[in-house]
Image (tube, grey):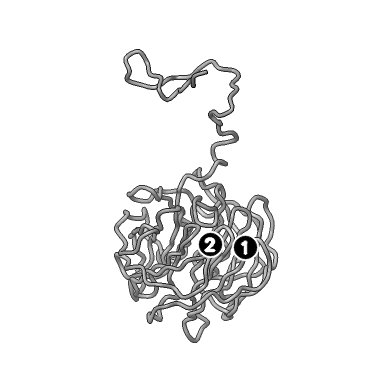
Amino acid sequence: MSDFRIDQITNQAGTAGPQIAGITTFSSTSGLLMPSGPTEYRGGRGRGVIGGGLNPAYFNVIQYITISTLGNAQDFGDLYQIVGSGGACASSTRGFFTGGSEPANSNVIQYITISSTGNSFDFGDTTLRRTYCPSVSDTTRGVTGGGITGPTRVNVIDYFTMSSLGNSSDFGDLTVNRRRASSASSPTRGIWYGGENGIITVNTIDYITISTTGDAIDFGDIATSDSLTDTADAASNSTRMIIGGGNFANTISYLTIASTGNSTDFGDLTQARGALGACSTPTRVVFAGGYLSSPYPAQLTIDYVEIATTGNAQNFGDLNEVQRSCPGLSDAHGGLGD
């Protein structure tokens, strides 16, 4: 019996493929699996979202980009609570903004549906009020670690289940108290990179296994003489974490998430800047916004790197509005797998 190959069928003019209509049943050992469920819950579209920040005061703007293309950001909606300098993470369908300043320390977790546009909604609360508290996630859990509450740098890690509304629960502790770390994840590991403890810049890299609970473990050190990486940001695919910027720095570094060891130089950003937002797909990391130097004017710049290579960043486009201290997330980051 010969195969019936639908990819070899054309219309009479040979200018187009088949149009299938009126079929009520279909049976085959191999065939087309149609997607099901509402469009907004299918995920995996490669959308990057940047939320909140300073401009120069705290504000609630959310912007989005399509990471695989080039171009300017577009308006997504507004955070329901004005906040900046918090954490961000995502599943393939929902994005989360955790903690931050309003300008007081916040414990609010806000969420959006990434594939749509619109304002955020209340999800629950973290275990304490804090700012500069980066987050990581796999397909199930969001995890927030470190930060500052009042004048105190903390090492607290907590987690929440992204598919249901509710408050965070205790996970464990980072190896050192810190704020302004960078974070990213693979499907199994979450990484916290650098930060500051109020006296010096922290050069320690920590990791956790996201599906468990417990204290973080030392991963390695920041392999750079740059002491200003405490306002860098990072994103990843399932293999590599890419870290960019810092106070007045244009440095880009990377590490292999599945191993342990020190970070390695990757290249340079198009602008030296800190307090930027980062998001990713399996192939590309984008860095958006940030500030250049005192008195810390916010920037429009978006640039990108290809994760599998090393080299300098290239221009992507501009934000719709200037933002700094603006956490980023995507529906296709490393914690969700490639």
222 above or below 279?
A: below
Q: Position of residue 289 (x, y in %)?
A: 38, 62
Q: Are marks 2 and 1 in contact (CB under 8 Å)?
A: yes
Which residue has dot 1 on it? 210
Q: Position of residue 32 (x, y in %)?
A: 53, 29
Q: Nearer the viewer, residue 275 or 138?
A: 138
Residue at image location 33% in from the left, 74% down from the top: 293
106 above or below 11?
A: below
Residue at image location 59% in from the left, 18% down from the top: 24
Residue type at mark 2 is Ser
Q: Looking at the image, which residue sits at the far top?
A: 12
Residue type at mark 1 is Ile
209 above or below 63?
A: below
Q: Position of residue 53 (x, y in %)?
A: 46, 63
Disc 1 on helix, strand or loop? loop
Which residue has dot 2 on it? 185
Residue at image location 40% in from the left, 66% down from the top: 56
Task: Tell me which numbered mark, 2 or 1, is placed earlier along the sequence.
Answer: 2
Residue 162 falls left or right of residue 280: right
Residue 323 falls left or right of residue 21: left
